[in-house]
Amino acid sequence: MEDNIEVKTTHGGHCHSGSLAIDVPHDCQKIVLVGNPNVGKSVFFNYFSGLYVDVSNYPGTTVEISQARYGDNLIIDTPGIYGVSSFNDEEAVARDIILSADTVINVVDAVHIERDLFLTLQLIDMGLPVIVALNFMDEVEQHGLVIDIDLLSDLLGVPVIPTVAVKRQGLEDVETAIGEAREGHQSPSLHKKLHEMLSRVGSQPEALIVLEGDPYVAARHGIEPGLEREAIYVSRRERVNDIIGHVVRETRTTETIRQQLGRMVLNPITGLPIFVIILYGLYELVGVLVAQMIVGVTEGTIMQGYWEPFITSVVNPLTSQSGVLGKILIGEFGLLTMTPTYLLGLLLPLVLGFYLALALMEDSGYLPRLATLVDRALNGIGLNGRAVVPLILGFGCVTMATITTRLLGTEREKTIATAILQWAIPCSAQLGVITVLLAALGPGYIALYMGAIFIILVAIGTILSRSLPGETSPLLIDLPPLRLPRLDNVVKKAVLRSYAFMKEATPWFFAGALIVSVMQVSGFLKIWETLWAPITTGWLELPRETATAFVMGLVRRDFGAAGLYTMRLSAVQTVVALVTITLFVPCIASLMILFKERGAKQAVPIWFGSWVLAFGLGGALAQVLARLM
């Protein structure tokens, strides 16, 4: 006999209800990790499960449920929440998981204990067996705090274990204490009301949620939601304040260097120069070191210097290079020549370099501060600063970033952010190829490309913001402390993300190369180029052969960009071709996620709109430049 955890999630304006894909034997205990955003739950999940999920120093890293076997039991990681309620998607998903938990490991940020204990007391009021893992204890002293852990445990009525999860300190103690999880000291003022509601709903956790006014849980039991949320919340906050007054003592009042730096990053006068310096550092890392020096070795020396002559010498005696099979295997678009060279010599170092840079920004805690810094600017295109997280992640992988739009507060903001991601944000592989091509042209053409894409991005956001109903929501985001990124986590994250990216991209690259090769040997490639000639040569003012790159771009935009890599283009033609391929249709994986997240009603216009944007604006740019240069 098996139990299913019923979960309802809302994405893209569509309510998908049904069971979460967790089949739980009836004797299996569900151990659920619960905590505020960015408290390190994913590190605990990695420890208990032996798996790896992303660990980053910004809120919203976990947007989906992660689950794994832990002995005979099940360990479940939930999105970060501030309370068990259903104000947004993450809270609704986490709420239903928590309601079915057998044991809760409540991960608390010791530095922000006053904030986090509100959720702890709510879990205790729900009557769930709880253990508190007091994380980031190594930073408590740095912030001039002293916490009386034994007294905290006594006041809460549950075990409290000090931990430094990223250093694996205290994790074994948490594991040992799972059997000691117990119900804590509930609010005396709630006791009578909970028992009255319990007789109506049959579950103490759900009784509390109904008392606090959750309409969805109340509807399941056919009763009206309670009207005492505000009174309960005020009482709980007073209990938190009382506990903090007894267990936390401050020993220092001056700011640390990290706190001063964190404040400078938020101030526009100092924050913008710091942002420019960081962008320059990223350019030196990805645009110079990786795109020019390392790719020169991997693509030019290794793949074209050694691999292609070797594989050609192996295949040539078996089948002539001028024959049909020879052209497909080792020809201009060869499955064994061009495709491995693009994948391993060109894209792999670029993708790895980009993910290393992204991981450094994530783990330092800079991303949430950047969100605060650019909040006002993003308001102009209908977003708040929180949208900077999916937009920057989009430069890594648009597919992943589209999923991350779930952390935005309204459907309107999710629609705008998704449209910008799909239309105007190049992924890491595409960005890498673009960087290689532009780096050879000089700073003027780099600025021209960036300026064109920036203007288009702002125009898209502005038009959508003014045409969609609703208003931009205010920015509410936690600012984690600035931390030195841990090298092992940065490298591990970059390698795993690069592996996942290449695993997804590789079959499509081979499929695209096969399609283009077959079109070449059948003569259809010439016909295709002729059919597209009015657009490529007449409107875009590019060579006829660039039509081949757009065939490749239909499979993946980065494959299309790579197709431009070997073409002889002038500087202006290169910029026009790159702007066009940047705005071209999203890759197939991204298109599937687009349908899943936003539904066909939005996905279809976005896909067809990319054709209009790419060729319309790419051609307009070509015509303007032709008259100016």
Image: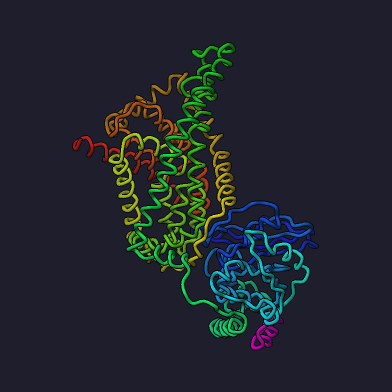
196 within the magenta span: yes
Residue 360: x and y, percent? Answer: 50, 52
Q: Total marks drawn? A: 0
Q: Is residue 128 above or below residue 344?
A: below
Magenta stretch?
186-202
- The location of residue 243, given as percent across then percent down, is 61, 82
Q: Nearer the viewer, residue 504 or 139?
A: 139
Q: With respect to residue 50, does 96 lie above or below?
A: below
Coloration mode: rainbow
The answer to whether residue 9 is left or right of residue 126 is left
Residue under the point 69% across and 68% down? 104
Residue 629 x %, y %: 20, 35
Position of 452 with respect to 173 (left or right) is left
Q: Which residue of the protein is positioned furthest toward the left in this rendering?
A: 627
Residue 537 seen in the figure: yes
In magenta stretch: residue 530: no
Instruction: Look at the picture and state if 264 lies above or below 329.
Output: below
Nearer-the-camera pick, 191 or 375: 375
Name which residue lies at 67% across and 71% down. 132
**Could you say where residue 249 lies in the image, as x and y percent from the top left?**
58, 80
Query: Residue 68, relative to residue 124: is it above or below?
Result: above
Q: Quadrant of residue 235?
A: bottom right
- Does residue 200 appear in this view? no
For the point 56% across and 13% down, the residue is: 319
Left or right: where 302 falls relative to 77: left
* Quarter of the rendering occupied by the N terminus: bottom right
- Overall secondary structure of the magenta section: helix
**Which of these two is toward me, 2 or 40?**
40
